[in-house]
Amino acid sequence: MDSVEMVEESYEEPTVRRRTVRTSYKIEETSSTTTTTKTVTATNQKLYGKDLSEYENLDVDQLLAQLSPEEISLLAKEVDPDDNFLPPSQRCSYTCEKEATGPLDRKKLIEHINKQALETPDVPELKPYVPGTIRGKKWIPPPQPVREREAEEQIAIDLGDEYENALTEASQEEIIDLAAILGFHSMMNQDQYHASLLNKGQPVGLGWDGITKASQPKAFPADPPNTTDVDATIRQVKDDDHQLVDLNWNNIKNISDEKFDQLFEGLGMNTHLETLSLSNVGMTDGVALKLADVLEQNNTLRVVNVETNFISPPVIVRLIKSLLGTKTMEEFRASNQRSQVLGNKIEMEITTLVEQNPTLLRLGLHLEYNDARHRVAMHLQRNIDRIRKDLNLRLQFRFFNNLCRKSLIK
């Protein structure tokens, strides 16, 4: 075989290079004093083959008068916008109006309908009715699922032979007493529970399945009237009697405004009275404003109670504001007034005034908003903690002295 000669050939492809040349032109603006006038020629606009200027001289009322009612309704649909104040169901035009095809006689129409109903035979049933036969299947509700307790949930308690024998041989009364001691209230009724606590023995015939009978309500006597002599206490307040430390006018009716004026006049100069109770005495806003002026002058009152009266919320704010003038007030109560709800504005004002008071430890007011309740409670607790740490301040406050006396009595 002849030898095959291998020849390698190489080709050189020319590369094409493109060069892009960009030329930028700078435009120089020059100002000139010459003015040029440009003439703009615009083509005349036309509408329906006529110039717009021809439509300006047309009489619109005359054109509308030539239209028929159908054409006017069509024009109104295209031109008038929808009334946004009407519901969508009433914006649509009613297109079901038709002319009567003939005279209507209601009596003859009803007679014709009744006659047609009687003459028309009933549609025969595919399957005749046979009394006593049941058609179809009767629906039977599925059985309720039974809750089976798993073996893991069952807890076996080994009480020992002694306790098991005691519980087995125990009577029903002893088991009821044991349930009352352990607090298993759901295992007994009310009479069994109270009889076990008082060691009276279980009522006869009242077992686990017994019916609790209604017991006769106990009539509690009414609270005795307040026998405090109003005139005598007013004289003691004016004379600054050192024995009068607690003044209680609670539940005294028909106290005149003159009596309140005399009392407040004496409070301005009194230096021994510490507790003033004016609950349920019919106090109004005018009397409460006079009390607020007196509280700014007195420096010995520690507790003021004006609950269950006819004081408005703004006057309550005035009373709390007057507490800032004295540095001895520890407790102020003014709940259950004519207006049960103070409002957000009043509660925020009360909260701001309480936060400015460094000596107030208790406040008897119902605040509805969480922010006001939280801020007032935090400030009162802060005052209590601050005074508790200082021994000298603690001895000056009646609140801590009463706590010490109660602890010694116990």
Image (cartoon, grey):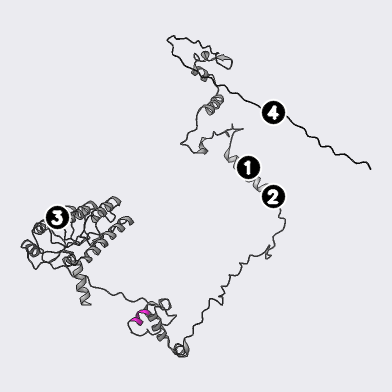
Q: Amino acid at mark 3?
A: Glu
**What span is in magenta?**
193-199
N-terminal-most mark, 2 or 4? 4
**Quadrant of the rendering where the C terminus is positioned:** bottom left
**10 Å neighbourhood of mark 2: few (<14), some, or many (≥20)?**
few
Local SS, label 1: helix
- Mark in the foreground, 2 or 4: 4
Residue, disc 2: 121
Locate residue 215: give its quadrant.
bottom left
Q: Amino acid at mark 2?
A: Pro
Residue, disc 4: 16
Report, in whole angstroms, how far the alpha carbon at label 2 lies from the one at label 4. 100 Å
Residue, disc 3: 296
Q: Amino acid at mark 4?
A: Val
Report, in whole angstroms, how far the alpha carbon at label 1 lies from the one at label 3. 96 Å
**10 Å neighbourhood of mark 4: few (<14), some, or many (≥20)?**
few
Residue 261 located left or right of residue 185: left
Residue ID at (65%, 27%): 18
* Discs 4, 1 touching: Cβ within 8 Å: no
